Image: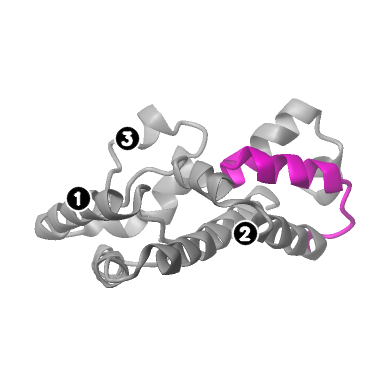
Amino acid sequence: MTIHELNTLPTEELRQALYNCCGSTTWVNKMISLLPMEELVELMDFAEEQWFSCSEADWREAFSQHPRIGDTASLNNKFPSTAQWAGAEQQGVNVARQQTLKLLEEGNKTYEEKFGYIFIVSASGKSADEMLHSLNARLQNNAAEELTIAAEEQNKITLLRLQKLMQ
């Protein structure tokens, strides 16, 4: 898709395309209000700026639109509009040892109990072992530190998905 094509999408198609990049309704509305854009770099800059101007509730909404790391079974059922992207992003779990997947599942549960949302990590290019290491390290954070890190990871995912959308 080109910038011109994005700028001229019907509103509901535009809303869905942006929501697939970042599952925050507030972020989507902010982005729609800024269109049209002239260049991809402008789109990316505004996307990041708008993300970090969102509230904690908006961030949590976006987090809720992701499958758990390693839970590839739920991709098509629970997240059909982003299953292809999420599956590619989590490609590292496809070749993971069973023990690593089990530890990811257990770590995800512990993380959710501690922080109240799923473990968010920009998984592209990471192995399951790397994601497990990150999850275990981040479990040591306090709630405020972790929310900031999770928001930064969501921003990375959003920017990556915007780039994919614009290819």
User: Residue placed at 65% from the left, 48% from the top?
Assistant: 165
Q: Amino acid at mark 1?
A: Glu
Q: Is residue 94 left or right of residue 45?
A: left
Q: Pinpoint residue 53: horizontal percent, then vertical percent.
A: 69, 57
Q: Which stretch appears magenta?
A: 18-40
- Please say if the residues under marks 3 and 1 sit with CB atoms less than 8 Å apart: no
Q: Secondary structure at mark 1?
A: helix
Q: From the viewer's perspective, is 45 left or right of 65?
A: right
Q: Residue at x 44, y 39 (%)?
A: 83
Q: Position of residue 17 (x, y in %)?
A: 66, 38
Q: Is residue 52 visible?
A: yes
Say what secondary structure mark 3 lies in: helix
Residue depicted at 81% across the width and 34% down the height: 9
For mark 2, does the 10 Å Cα neighbourhood hold few (<14), some (14 to 19), or many (20 or more) residues? some
Residue 28 included in the magenta stretch of the image: yes
Residue 135, image x and y in percent? Answer: 29, 64
Mark-to-mark CA distance, 2 and 3: 23 Å
Q: Amino acid at mark 2?
A: Leu
Mark 3 vs mark 1: which is more N-terminal? 3
Q: Residues within 10 Å of mark 1 (few under 14, many from 20)?
A: some
Q: Amino acid at mark 3?
A: Ser
Residue at label 1?
A: 105
Q: Which mark is residue 159?
A: 2
Q: Nearer the N terminus, badge 2 or badge 3?
A: 3
